[in-house]
Amino acid sequence: MLTREKDETLSVGKRTTKAHAEHADLFISLHANAGEKSCLGIETFYCDSSFLTMEMHHGGSEKKASTLSMKKKWGILSKDLATYIDSQIMSLVGSKTVSRGIKGGALQVLMGFQGPAVLIEAGYLTNPIESTLLKTDKYQFLLVDGICKGIKKFIEKHFA
């Protein structure tokens, strides 16, 4: 299910709320990056609970500790999901771009989802070569096919 089907602004909170309302098992946030013209490549992010530890322990409540424990579990699954997706995307488009790696962090859009979640930066719109690729149906299909194959491998490992 898509959280939006046209070019419109949808707050981070509304994206995760919609995903939860639809009982989504996974959350995939797909973006195009921007940077210096020489920057290129695909990055896959997951919510790493170690970035949240300090924030979650302020106040010391049991609810915060419980939330951190659950985020650790989701973080492990999210990293695994990110690894599968990155691997599958790169197997299809590796000759056209590079993997900038799998990176943990405390990205707001990922922190709001209660389950495995990743954010994919599919390339740089500011890089002339990647920008051209990102606009083609063929390249978009390869990216989506890689994402789907990565999700399938993840599901086969954890839920089959």
Image (cartoon, helix red, strand yellow):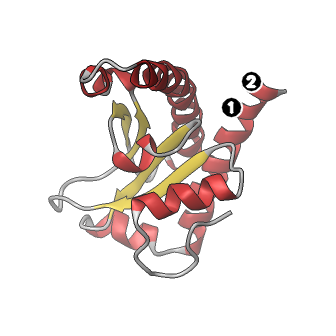
Q: Is residue 57 left or right of residue 121?
A: left
Q: Residue furthest left?
A: 36
* Secondary structure of the residue carrying numbered label 1: helix
Q: Position of residue 8 (x, y in %)?
A: 44, 80
Q: Position of residue 73 (x, y in %)?
A: 54, 21
Residue at screen point 39% across, 73% down: 132
| Amino acid type shown at disc 1 | Phe
Q: Position of residue 96 (x, y in %)?
A: 44, 53
Which residue lies at the image location 60% right of the left edge and 40% below the top edge?
A: 88
Q: Which residue is mark 1?
A: 154
Q: Nearer the viewer, residue 64 or 132?
A: 64
Q: Residue at x 68, y 31 (%)?
A: 154
Local crowd at mark 1 within 10 Å, few (<14), some, or many (≥20)? many
Q: Secondary structure at mark 2?
A: helix
Q: Quadrant of the N terminus?
A: bottom right
User: For residue 144, which quarter of the picture?
Assistant: bottom right
Q: Which mark is residue 157?
A: 2
Q: Decide if residue 111 is on the left or right side of residue 141.
A: left
Assign the C terminus to one quadrant of the image.
Answer: top right
**Residue 138, relative to residue 25: is it above or below?**
below
